[in-house]
Amino acid sequence: MDKLLGHKQALFSFLRERWQALFDVRFEVLLYDLTSTYFECDVPETGKRKFGYSRDKRSDCVQVVIALIVTPEGFPLAYEVMPGNTSDKTTLADFIRKIEAQYGKAQRTWVMDRGIPTEETLAQMRAAEPPVDYLVGTPKGRLSRLEKEFLKLPWEAVREAVDVKLLEQEGELYVLARSTGRVDKERSMRKRRLKKLLKRLQELQGQTLTRDQLLLKLGAAKKEAGRAYGLVDIRLPDKDQAVMPETFNFALNRRKLRIARRREGSYLLRSNLKGDNPALLWQYYIQLTEVEQAFKELKGDLSIRPIYHQTDDRIEAHIFVAFMAYCLQVTLKHRLRALAPGLTPRAVLEKMATLQMVDVHLPTTDGRCLILSRYTQPEKDQQLLLSQLKLELPPQPPPKITAVALPTR
């Protein structure tokens, strides 16, 4: 397996050529994201298993971080396994160099979420020759600084229920996108969390608590409420005061609520692409869900976790096998999309799982054994699926004769 991992870069090049030949895949747009996968084990003294930010909400476990690049269609181009305490912001520059070293400095657009690039990395991408194009999500807090400029601009419809505004500033293009569907979803989530938070605060007012106990319970409430917690002004008792309705009270901050409602369903993106089609920019960013889907399938259908291995080389091998399985799954998914729409890879694999190969052992009169290897005949629906996918089962293997008969049980 160590020798196989040494050919990982060559494998990436091979996969790129095969997908281009099979599906005419283009590689001008690359989606980049990271995830983590955890280990339930004792804390190791060496190796890549480290404590870090857990996307699996298992901060009690050591983990490794996996970085993945896929095309907008979901075809993986490269991956890397890094120590579990790796910061997202330190990974992008190295990955850009690796891709350029392997495939050259072609015109590419990198699409990523807001927590990945630093301002320094984005400046380096703009200053590169040729410039490295990017489209990245931006925290909504930056919208406060740009809100006055955006208010002067008209909304432009780019697709059904999606409007955008474009603002050029300091060599970058800011894209404010608003989705009606996202508005309804965020409003419903915020309303539910805010209602639950206010109910919890009322309960705490009626309990007999010390100030320290109150702070602990408020911490738990804040974690559960998320951003809704910031919409409530809470007055805490002083250190020498008892926890009473007069010393501990709260009120909904209606000004903050109005601002939150005004920004619901909005995405703020930034890019160094000039004069590009706003609909295309929106489409690029929404396609980040392909990376999320890849991680979901790796962790779910393909069982990248749990990982029981204890050494880095075995961990790498485990993830390598899962990556190869994902490549096969993506290939099958796109074959189905073209030849059998509506079917998923999981449904096809479950349907084909009943096709089995069996060995029939027949003893001969001279003491030897005749072995007939036979696969079960496909049912009608399986045969139809094979025909639709333009696949043919191989011929039944020829019989074999062993020199010595197998012992009977």
Image: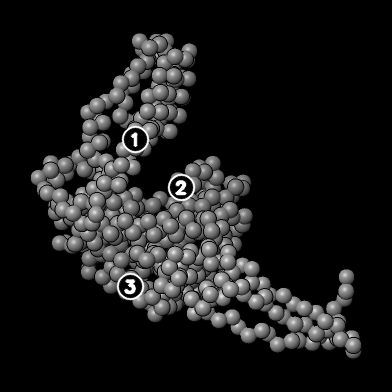
In this view, the residue in front, 287 or 78, is: 287
Give the foreground label among 2 and 3.
3
Residue plotted at (80% across, 85% down): 370
In the displayed structure, 258 sits above or below 185; it is above
In the displayed structure, 339 sits above or below 204; it is below
Residue 110: x %, y % from top left:
30, 62
Q: Residue 26 shows which numbered tag? A: 3
Residue 64: x %, y % from top left:
50, 53
Instruction: Name the N-terminal-most of marks 2 and 3.
Output: 3
Q: Residue 55 shows which numbered tag? A: 2
Residue 284: x %, y % from top left:
29, 60
Instruction: Name the N-terminal-most of marks 3 and 1.
Output: 3
Residue with the mark numbered 1: 190
Q: Would residue 351 be found to the left or right of residue 24 on screen?
A: right
Residue 367: x %, y % from top left:
89, 86
- Tell me the quarter of the image containing the N terminus: bottom right
Residue type, numbered disc 3 = Arg
Tell me the distance, in whole angstroms, between the alpha carbons under discs 3 and 1.
39 Å
Residue plotted at (15% across, 56% down): 171
